């Protein structure tokens, strides 16, 4: 979570709980509910006005802006209401508001025995958003490519996975529409008992937007004999602060491929990309994601 900023002081209740009877407190709660409802309806009006301006484009999701708002709300929050509950409430709200722009539909590749990836998608996109589960990444990506789904939730790439599982290599081809990684799940790092423990990426047919605290994914084609040490040195010399590096050498392939997680938001035209000397072809920015939110106890 970003450094805390000064927050406004909560308005004290007009009467202490001990001096008000239950009927009065319930009446105040009813008034607060009505006020919250009025604000929700007004927010929907503003969202419709934004939609009328055509600002959202083909894909209504803006994960970077969504993450930056969630961080801002978490920073200004005070009182006994749990921050995690605040963020989850806001996630449900924002997905309902986003659907006003264009109906949402989520494709999920889930091969877990307990449907954990589906549960993670529900947590992020809302309880009632239309969602269809598939057993292969290619099926979920196809839903994006054909416009049948707004976003797809795919397993986090792993070292040593099969070519069928390595869905990120397909993004190197820059097909039309171009598919990007735009978010990482879960956004809340706190995982209480019963919460889905799986990690995943969200992909859409739109470029990611910055949140202010991001990491980017680079796809690289390398010579078969390339080593992690050489690649790491090349990335550092170009000015990248690299984290996780996945290196693939598929049997019979003419070259190796690497998926590199780097610090910051990297656009397609970033001059550091052309400074990479170990690559066989121009690097591809596969996307970016907002750094997940850590909530201090």
Image (cartoon, helix red, strand yellow):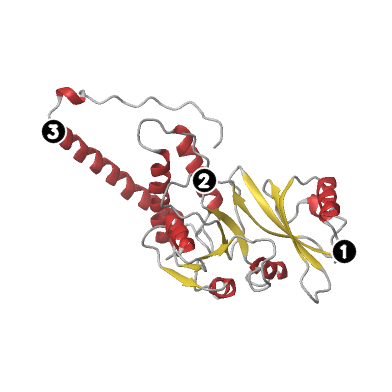
Q: Which residue is mark 1?
A: 225
Measure the alpha-carbon separation of dots 2 and 3: 38 Å
Please report contact status of discs 1 and 2: CB closer than 8 Å, yes or no: no
Name the secondary structure under disc 2.
loop
Measure the alpha-carbon separation of dots 1 and 2: 37 Å
Along the viewing direction, whichever of 193 and 144 lies nearer the viewer: 193
Along the viewing direction, whichever of 181 and 96 lies nearer the viewer: 181
Which mark is first along the chain, 1 or 3? Answer: 3
* Mark number displayed over residue 164: none
Describe residue 101's horizontal placement relative to residue 161 as left or right.
left
Q: Position of residue 57 (x, y in %)?
A: 53, 61
Q: Which residue is mark 2?
A: 189
Q: Which residue is mark 3?
A: 22
Is residue 52 at all visible to an observer of this figure?
Answer: no
Q: Position of residue 189 (x, y in %)?
A: 51, 45
Foreground mark, 3 or 1? 1
């Amino acid at each position: 979570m970003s450094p805390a900023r000064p927050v406004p002081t909560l308005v004290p209740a007009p009467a202490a709980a001990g001096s008000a009877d239950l009927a009065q407190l319930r009446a105040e709660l009813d008034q607060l509910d009505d006020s919250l409802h009025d604000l929700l309806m007004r927010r929907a009006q503003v969202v419709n006005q934004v939609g009328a301006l055509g600002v959202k484009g083909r894909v209504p999701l803006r994960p970077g802006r969504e993450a930056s708002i969630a961080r801002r709300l978490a920073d200004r929050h005070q009182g006994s209401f749990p921050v995690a509950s605040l963020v989850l409430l806001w996630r449900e709200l924002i997905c309902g508001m986003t659907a006003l722009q264009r109906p949402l539909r989520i494709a999920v590749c889930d091969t877990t025995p307990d449907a954990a990836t589906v549960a993670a998608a529900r947590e992020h996109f809302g309880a009632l958003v239309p969602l269809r589960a598939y057993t292969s990444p290619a099926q979920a990506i196809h839903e994006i490519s054909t416009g049948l789904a707004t976003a797809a939730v795919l397993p986090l790439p792993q070292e040593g996975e099969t070519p069928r599982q390595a869905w990120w290599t397909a993004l190197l081809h820059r097909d039309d529409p171009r598919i990007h990684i735009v978010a990482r799940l879960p956004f809340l790092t706190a995982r209480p008992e019963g919460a889905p423990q799986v990690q995943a990426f969200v992909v859409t047919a739109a470029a990611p937007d910055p949140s202010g605290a991001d990491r980017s994914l680079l796809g690289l084609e390398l010579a078969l004999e390339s080593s992690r040490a050489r690649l790491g040195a090349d990335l550092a010399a170009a000015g990248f602060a690299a984290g996780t590096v996945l290196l693939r050498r598929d049997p019979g392939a003419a070259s190796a491929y690497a998926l590199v997680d780097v610090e910051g938001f990297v656009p397609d035209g970033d001059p550091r990309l052309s400074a990479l000397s170990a690559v066989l072809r121009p690097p591809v920015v596969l996307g970016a994601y907002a750094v997940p939110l850590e909530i201090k106890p």
